[in-house]
Amino acid sequence: MKALERALSWLLSGRRQTASHALLAPAVLWLLIFLVTPALGLVALSLARNGAYGDVVWSLGLRNYRRAFAPQFAPVLLRTVGFASATTALCLLLGYPLAYFLSFRAGRWRGALIIALMVPFWTSSLVAFYSWMIILGKEGLINAALMRFGFLSSPMGMLYTPFSVLLGLVYFYLPFTVLPLYGSLEKIPRQYVEAAYDLGAPRWAAFREVTLPLSLPGVIAGALLTFIPCLGDFLTAELLGGPRYYLLGNLISNQFLMAQDWPFGAALTSLLLAGMIAGLWLYRRWEPDA
Amino acid sequence: MSQNLLELGPLSKSFGTAAILREVSLTVRRGEFMTLLGPSGCGKTTTLRIIAGFESPDSGRVRLDGVDVTDLPPYERDVHTVFQHYALFPHLDVAGNIAFGMRMDKVPEGEIARRVPQALAMVKLSGFEKRRVSSLSGGQMQRVALARAIAGRPALLLLDEPLGALDLKLRKEMQLELKRLQKKLGIAFVYVTHDQEEAMTMSDRIAVFNAGRIEQLGTPGEIYETPRTSFVADFIGGANIYSAEVLPAAAGRARLLIEGEHEIDVPLDEHESLPAPGGRVKIAIRPERVKVFYKDELPAGALRFKAVLLDSVFLGDACQIYLDFLKKSPDKPLTALAGGDRYSAHDDLGVPVIAAVQPEDVYILESDGR
């Protein structure tokens, strides 16, 4: 309880424990009931064994973890890390100029543009992905248009390809990248940029030597906020990728929903969680004292 | 090589409908310490930003060393700025900050390695190379900002209220140090401040700004001894300002009726001009030039005004005395400044006294139309 409270106040206030303990109590209770308890339950479950009929046999062991590292799952893991990395890279590539524009150039359009950016965030992901299916499908908008104007004789397959998975991931996670980037760019006092110009740095040099290094915390935060949820994403691959491009998230959901092997699913989930927590911990350690 | 390093003018600048600068012209000589002095919103900072290249004027040109730089971006001007809040780069250490400008100018690394400690020694921070900016005190940041700005040896240094964030004692020290450094380097400084005392202490010349114009330009002595307008008289050192009617007078003299009550006869300085008799002027009298006497023991030649001691305020090193000398306008007391020991006793309040002013200490001001 004490440790959790400390962890929460640490999360809320950076490294200073300024939050009052009494004020934290409801949140601590909430997290205890709905986060910590299920997570511990999950870890416990991962140590159990799957019975013959999908039931759980409580003979504890590490067999599920050994199985998780079996060579047959390596492609899924590699594919997941690959897609998450590619998504993160693309989101940074698209998101940095966007965040820069929002912060430095947008002027009075800023508010409207940020809302436009948030739309995918607020749209039900199911609706969004079905829209993409309509756009990308064999009889979808793009194919229909290209064939109508004679650029194509037969529809090209865009849906259920790595392209459509990547597109869906980038579409969905772009705001996760842009918002922290925008936040960190906003925090840079414009006088630093002026000082760089003043000392003889042309625009590009001022960006490279001052703005970019000062926005690095935002780059790291944006990358993590994109990469980590990407690791657990299953809906995108499910709807836009199909079984050939299943990711770790699909593997996990299959254990629970189809294979009825809850202990193995729990082990995979625990590993994923551990990886995410390790990533966040590294980020907190790296983060400069703000 | 012309004597003028910087020639401005006539600069005008508006933001929206607000006119910030109205035809400001100014020249700065080589090695000169020029201060732009004025209250906030007077246009002094905008002028500095136009010189630096952060703003462009609506009209008027900026010439640096005879070259028109009006349309050049800041990074192509041989001018460096010490910013109000220093703007030291937080991701670089002290040496990295000081080297920044030289790196941009492609100065060889060996040369940079020699010049960084020199610049630090100049601001008395030797050995601070590897310190993080966030670990410095306000005064130290100020010095690093200064070292960064002078390390690249610009022709002109711009300083935007650089001492504003320091406490009084440190500010006084830094004023003298800045002045010494400026003389030693021989770099021209354009220094923006709203602190008239700071301007007096350091400047070779002061341009007093008000409402987007330069009201008066001159040495600290000229500005103080011969203020041209009521704004300058009041802003620099403070002044008692009264309205007076011009009476017929002998050549080179002015006879004035102050607020319809006291008639005086004072010499007219060469820069002072008078409207025809019957017209009105404003006059200023410095508080420290008003002497208060209890008995009729006046120094020869002084103007004398019968007055009543209204109030006195003890200021530590001096005492401010308020005298009522206008029967018709009791809301315009005469302020006098005296040594702290003499008039601090409140027992004297209400006592009739004599206020004495030397005739040459009455300044006749230009009508400024406001």
Image (cartoon, coloured by chain):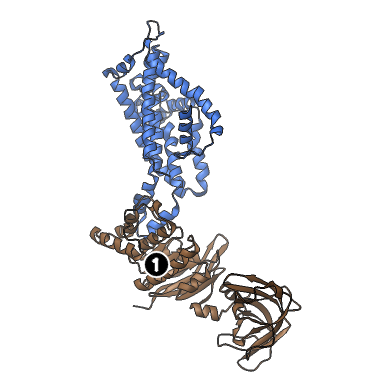
Chain colours: A blue, B brown
Would you name the residue on which mark 1 appears? Answer: B157
In the rendered image, the quadrant that contains the C terminus of chain A is top left
Residue toward you, B362 or B8: B362
Task: Judge left or right: residue B8 versus residue B185.
Answer: right
Give residue B64's position: percent from left, percent from top: 38, 70
Q: What residue is at 46 percent from the left and 23 percent from the top?
A: A36
Looking at the rendering, which quadrant does residue B61 occupy?
Answer: bottom left
Chain at numbered mark 1? B
Residue toward you, B319 or B106: B319
Looking at the rendering, which quadrant does residue B317 occupy?
Answer: bottom right
Give residue B325's position: percent from left, percent from top: 71, 79
Give the SS element for disc 1.
strand
Give residue A182's position: percent from left, percent from top: 45, 43
Classify 10 Å Cα crowding around label 1: few (below 14), some (14-19), many (20 and above).
many
- In this rendering, does residue A167 appear at all? no
Looking at the rendering, which quadrant does residue B158 occupy?
Answer: bottom left
Give residue B167's position: percent from left, percent from top: 49, 61
